[in-house]
Image: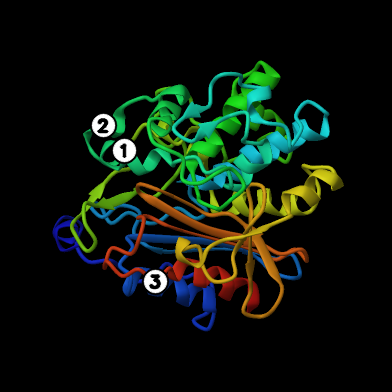
Amino acid sequence: MAAALAVGGTLPAAAQTHGSGDPVRQGLERLVRDDRYPAALAATVDRDGRTRNYTAGVSDLRTGAKVPVDGQVRAGSNTKAFTATVVLQLVGEGRIALDAPIEEYLPDLVRGEGIDGRRITVRQLLQHTSGLPNYTDFMVADYVGERRHTYYQPRALLDVALAHKALFAPGNGWSYSNTNYVLAGLLVEKVTGRPLAEQITHRVIDRIGLRHTYFPGVGDEGIREAHPQGYHAAKPGGPLEDITRLDPSWGWAAGQLISTPGDLNRFFAALVGGRLLGPAELAQMRTTVEVPDDTGLGTGVRFGLGVTSTPLSCGGLAWGHGGDIPGYSTRNAVTDDGRAAAVAVTAVGAPTGQHVDNAQALVDTALCR
């Protein structure tokens, strides 16, 4: 951080959109001041349907530019909720069966040590109970180093995963794996005969009018609309490098989308509100399994089909997902009564090297105030 500030100067105080007593604004200021994120953005919807946007910090450490209100960020694993929504729409259309083996749709593809597509169901992919190894565990140096400009085809990502043995027998455990969602994306393409990006765009983004959300095209390394720069430190507490431009193809169905805090609120509100799925499919999505405490997702978090449920400090549950991708981290959730909150910061993990997820805590603050 010290090296980065030598270029950009000191971080300014948060851009204020509301009074000093606003807990969300105060929380954003702490993310910049104490956790040392270059920028933090938030969008909230309260019980009365009022929408508020907040910013703190600077968009660019070099120039000190202001943070764009509701600016675009790489949404990371929030993409999984979009992919799962399309799969469940196809379930509702009778074109996919949740408890059918993936082998039925992608024959002879899922094979490896302890891995057999004839024993892994579509449901297990969406719920991370397949036991498939996570390909990104073996690619970290690639997508934050010089190879971050490399284009990866989905099958190449799958090959990385299948070169490693299964973590457990299907249905006998839980482990977060981006591989599950690469397969879900391939499933969508096989069943529809169309590109995944097109299906997410037509079936989700356009359907509910998300004007600032898109699936980057092949070779698209930038972010199209106003956005804060994304930063990465090679080690916790190390100097921050601008990592905004990268090829997100390694995330594909698991993490490629670009969105804004406001659009993420609109998406999850529409999803939970039944505007994207039929009642039966939404009930399946919201049927959750226990997540081990050592996953880092938080106490009491449970996983459904592409969504998480998180207990709130004020009671009840919030639904969402969240996402981390080099340069950006988002935390977001909505409640059944219409409250929503999304917080984005411009690094994965606090640049101070601390491991407390204060962005997630701020989502709870926003929903419970």
Taking the spot 32% from the left edge, 75% from the top edge, the residue there is 34
Identify the residue shown where x is 51% and y is 33%: 115
**Residue located 64% across and 29% down the image:** 102
What kind of residue is marked 2? Arg
- First in residue order: circle 1 vs circle 3: 1
Q: How many angstroms separate mark 1 from mark 3 (CA)?
A: 24 Å
Q: What element carries label 2?
A: helix
Q: Foreground residue, 23 or 119?
A: 119
The dot on residue 356 is 3
| Residue 147 percent location from the top left of the image | 26, 31
Q: Residue 103, position in %: x, y? A: 63, 25
Rendering coords of residue 303 (x, y %)? 62, 56
Q: Is residue 47 left or right of residue 185?
A: right
- Identify the residue under disc 1: 143
Q: Name the residue under label 2.
A: 147
Crowd around label 2: few <14 · some 14–19 · many ≥20 (10 Å): few
**Marks 3,2: beta carbons within 8 A:** no
